[in-house]
Structures are given as structure tokens and as C-alpha cells.
Amino acid sequence: MISVLEIISAMIIPLLIFFIVVYGIIKKVKVYETFIEGAKEGFNISIKIIPFLVAMLVAIGIFRSSGAMDFLTYLFSPITNLIGMPPEALPVSLIRPLSGSGTLGIASEIMKTYGPDSLIGRMVSVIVGSGETTFYVLAVYFGSVGITKTRHAVPAGIIADIVGILVSVWLVNWMFG
């Protein structure tokens, strides 16, 4: 079974690219020219989002360096204990909606400290995999196209993040706890 999965995982990306090119040819799309146009647009969008990205990363760095993260972990430890989440996993839950790279940095510190096969390591891995960088997405993508009124995007994103965290905690405790 593992060898079949290894073969599939090695072949999936090349097959997907091949399928896209063949589908484009069948639909009589100029595949290469369309790809180049998309790359140009992607470059222009990346130039627009750099200020939003820098602002978000600076804010996260200040938050972590100030000790506010440690204070929040201490403050919320009774709640995390109540739901079955080790308090050490809380920083990942708090940073995940803000930054993917910040989350991976914290997660790697947790993995080094507790190990990837520990309950905390597994829980952090599932939280990282089931969460989204909600505020990063809103700031970068909405900012790049000039949307200032997010309407229901923020509450829906926060609710999805909370549900993802709670289900991750429950699932890991159920399977490994």
C-alpha cells in the first residue's frame, strides 16, 4: 500500500500539469501565451501586496518579542486545559490566522522541544494543517484589489478558525490521547 501511495505522490503533479496542457490544447487555448500573461499578472499583484505582507510580519514579530504571546498563553491556560489543549499549543492557534511562516516557526520550536510524535506535536501539526491564515489572506488579497469593507469575511474566517482548532484538539485527543 505504501509503495502505491509513493508512486501516486510522485506522479500527481506531473500528471496534473500534463492534463492542464492537454486540456488547453483541446480547447484551442494558446497555453504558453496564457501562462506568460498569468505570470505577468502574478508579478504585478505580488508588487502590490508587499507592503501588506511587511506590515503583517512586523506586527507578528513585535507581538512575539514583547512577551504578549507568553502572557496570553498563561492567561488562557485554564480554558485550554478545559478543552483538552496543552497550553503550549495555544501560540500556534493564535498565530495561525495571522501568518503561515510565523506558525511554522512556532510549530518547529514545539517539535524540537516536545517531539513530533508527542501529543502536543501531533496536535500542533493538525492545527497547522486544518487552519487558514485568515487575516493574512484578508489583508493581502482584499488590500491588493482595494476592498475595504470585508462584510462577513472576518466573522466567517474567525468561526472557521475556531472550529478547526476545536476539531483538531478533539480529534488528536480521541486518536492519540
Image (cartoon, helix red, strand yellow):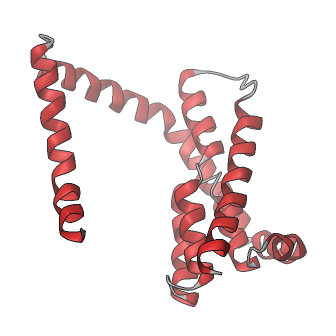
Quadrant assignment, res 155: top right
Task: Please identify the quarter of the rendering in which residue 167 is found.
Answer: bottom right
- Most extreme residue toward the front, as rendered? 1
Q: Position of residue 92 (x, y in %)?
A: 65, 66
Q: Is residue 28 visible?
A: yes
Left or right of 72, for residue 49: left
In the image: residue 97, left or right of residue 125: right
Please identify the quadrant where the C terminus is shown. bottom right
Q: Which residue is drawn at the image coordinates 50% and 36% (left, top)?
A: 49
Mark yes or no: residue 106 visible: no
10 to the left or right of 107: left
Which residue is pictured at 59% across the width and 79% down the height? Answer: 176
At horizontal 80% and vertical 74% (from top left) the residue drawn is: 73
**In front: 122, or 68?**
122
Q: In which quarter of the view is residue 28 placed?
A: top left
164, 1: nearer the viewer: 1
Where is 7 relative to 145, above or below? below
Query: Could you tell me how many numbered marks the image carries?
Result: 0
**Residue drawn at x 74%, y 52% as measured from the top left:** 162
Of 121 and 103, the residue lying toward us = 121
The vertical placement of 105 against 132, above or below, is: below
Q: Position of residue 18 (x, y in %)?
A: 12, 35
Tell me residue 44's x, y (percent): 37, 28
Q: Quadrant of the N terminus?
A: bottom left
Residue most toward the top?
28
Q: Position of residue 62 (x, y in %)?
A: 70, 63
